């Protein structure tokens, strides 16, 4: 990659103020460091990864509204926290975590302390955890 | 130079190691290995420790080492680093950063992703050092205890180059996931994406390969340009024209990776997962795989 060809594609995704270091060659073929504000290809795949997260969160939200999943399922999807990770953080079996995710009644019946711990793990406050919108 | 002497250059595609259901792809060796090799080869006395799930111990030890005046490198999850732009914050557990002091109850951070220094609160740093999931770092931290007065770079460079030549091509046939051959392995997988899964997934899998390749910190083309820069420096230091040619060859391979990313990005953007599109980018990968194999064969035998 030539130094003067390092892409400088602007995007809202990275926030504009952010640059990444790229290695490129100058006119004599010597390697130089060039700051790049972004590249379309890179931005496309990054936004795509976030679109996927948002899409999954949207699907989870619908399930919550339909009364099929608990609000925990929505928030953990939003935080990209899968069952395995939740079970590790909570120090709980995967089966139990699954019950809390996919059985709203079971989640609602949990003691306040357990809900609090879930909120702590997801880095949100308890009130937020109990809502989904 | 550090990446080269640490023999960082590698490739692996691991369908058995899934992150959020997406096969793992990496363009470098395992986290921690580069610094380990680098310090071994340069004779730097390096202390590394991890703390299981003992967060308190991990934070106390950090303070203790900082008090002794050492800067401390550590593994963290980018998800829990509040100073990074939201767009980068996925659950990725192998992000290295440097803490170089503590001031007014906040840690002073030098993060390779930022071109300025910043601070982080003890609570946030603790979270970032002890995440769960794939490659959980368990608070792993490392620091140089002593550095030799005179470091002899040339033997370290030669050793590192030979090692990379060996490591990238000498993986056994029953492990197609590692080394240059894994690029061809991945090419075959990519060619089958449109028939093996639905469109959304196919595009997600492909996008992830590109993301790992171009993510911040790779220097572009999945560390290939950084490695070519290293070979260029090595060629000068050792006055070795053969290495200089190999540097150019690696730059060419890097350019091909960029071409692949460009084409793959277009497929992802257009959300068209046609058989033909995937076949043609799989062919690009196949060619890159062949070129990398040939490259590392030469690198292994280069006269130094």
Image (cartoon, helix red, strand yellow):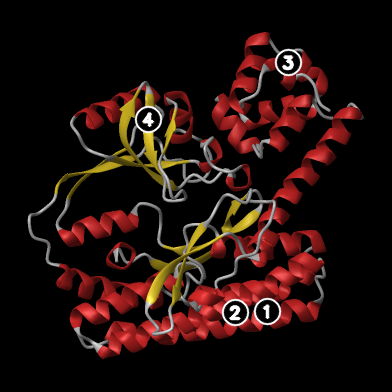
- Residue that numbered label 3 is attached to: A127
Asked if the residues shown at circle 2 and circle 3 are in contact, with their CB atoms under 8 angstroms apart, the answer is no
Which residue occupies 59% across, 82% down?
B286
- Taking depth in this image into account, of B98 and B278 the one nearest to the observer is B98
> In 3D space, how far apart are the residues under numbered discs 1 and 2 (Cα atoms)?
6 Å
Other residues around mark 3 within 10 Å, as few (<14) / some (14–19) / many (≥20): few
Name the side, left or right, on which B179 lies relative to B8: right
- Quadrant the C terminus of chain B occupies: bottom left
- Using the image, name the chain to which the residue with label 3 belongs: A
- Taking depth in this image into account, of B172 and A81 the one nearest to the observer is A81
- Residue that numbered label 4 is attached to: B107
Mark 4 vs mark 2, foreground winner is: 4
Label 4 or label 1, whichever comes before in sequence order: 4
Mark 4 vs mark 1, foreground winner is: 4
Residue at the extreme top: A112
Compared with residue B216, is residue B165 higher up or lower down, i.e. above or below? below
Mark 2 vs mark 3, foreground winner is: 3
- Residue that numbered label 2 is attached to: B285
Name the side, left or right, on which B295 lies relative to A39: left
- Using the image, name the chain to which the residue with label 4 belongs: B
- Using the image, name the chain to which the residue with label 1 belongs: B
Asked if the residues shown at circle 1 and circle 2 are in contact, with their CB atoms under 8 angstroms apart, the answer is yes
Other residues around mark 2 within 10 Å, as few (<14) / some (14–19) / many (≥20): many
Res. B181 in view: no
- Quadrant the N terminus of chain B occupies: bottom left
- Residue that numbered label 1 is attached to: B281
**Local SS, label 4:** strand
């Amino acid at each position: 990659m030539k130094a003067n060809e390092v892409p400088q594609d602007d995007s809202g995704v990275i926030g504009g103020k952010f640059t990444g270091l790229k290695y490129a060659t100058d006119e004599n073929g010597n390697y130089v460091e060039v700051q790049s504000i972004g590249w379309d290809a890179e931005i496309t795949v990054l936004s795509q990864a976030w679109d996927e997260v948002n899409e999954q969160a949207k699907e989870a939200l619908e399930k919550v509204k339909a009364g099929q999943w608990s609000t925990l399922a929505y928030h953990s999807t939003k935080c990209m926290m899968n069952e395995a990770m939740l079970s590790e953080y909570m120090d709980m079996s995967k089966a139990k975590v699954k019950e809390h995710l996919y059985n709203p009644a079971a989640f609602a019946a949990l003691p306040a302390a357990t809900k609090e711990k879930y909120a702590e793990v997801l880095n949100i406050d308890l009130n937020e955890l109990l809502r989904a919108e | 130079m550090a990446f080269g002497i640490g023999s960082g250059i590698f490739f692996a595609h691991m369908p058995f190691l899934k992150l959020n259901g997406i096969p793992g792809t990496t363009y470098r060796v395992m986290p921690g290995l580069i610094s380990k090799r680098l310090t071994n080869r340069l004779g730097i006395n390096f202390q590394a420790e991890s703390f299981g799930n003992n967060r308190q111990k991990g934070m106390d030890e950090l303070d203790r080492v900082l008090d002794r005046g050492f800067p401390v490198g550590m593994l963290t999850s980018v998800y829990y680093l509040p100073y990074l732009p939201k767009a980068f914050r996925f659950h990725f557990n192998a992000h290295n950063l440097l803490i170089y002091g503590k001031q007014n109850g906040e840690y002073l951070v030098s993060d390779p992703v930022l071109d300025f220094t910043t601070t982080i609160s003890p609570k946030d740093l603790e979270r970032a050092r002890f995440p769960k999931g794939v490659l959980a770092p368990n608070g792993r931290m490392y620091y140089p205890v002593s550095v030799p007065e005179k470091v002899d770079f040339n033997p370290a460079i030669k050793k590192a180059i030979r090692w990379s030549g060996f490591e990238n091509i000498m993986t056994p046939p029953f492990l197609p996931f590692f080394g240059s051959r894994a690029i061809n392995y991945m090419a075959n997988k990519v060619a089958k994406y449109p028939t093996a899964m639905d469109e959304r997934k196919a595009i997600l899998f492909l996008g992830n390969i590109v993301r790992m390749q171009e993510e911040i910190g790779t220097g572009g083309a999945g560390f290939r340009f950084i490695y070519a820069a290293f070979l260029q420096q090595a060629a000068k230091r050792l006055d070795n024209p053969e290495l200089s040619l190999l540097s150019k060859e690696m730059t060419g391979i890097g350019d091909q990776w960029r071409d692949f990313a460009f084409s793959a990005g277009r497929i992802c953007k257009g959300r068209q997962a046609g058989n033909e599109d995937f076949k043609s980018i799989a062919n690009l990968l196949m060619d890159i795989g062949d070129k990398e194999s040939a490259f590392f064969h030469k690198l292994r035998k280069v006269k130094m």
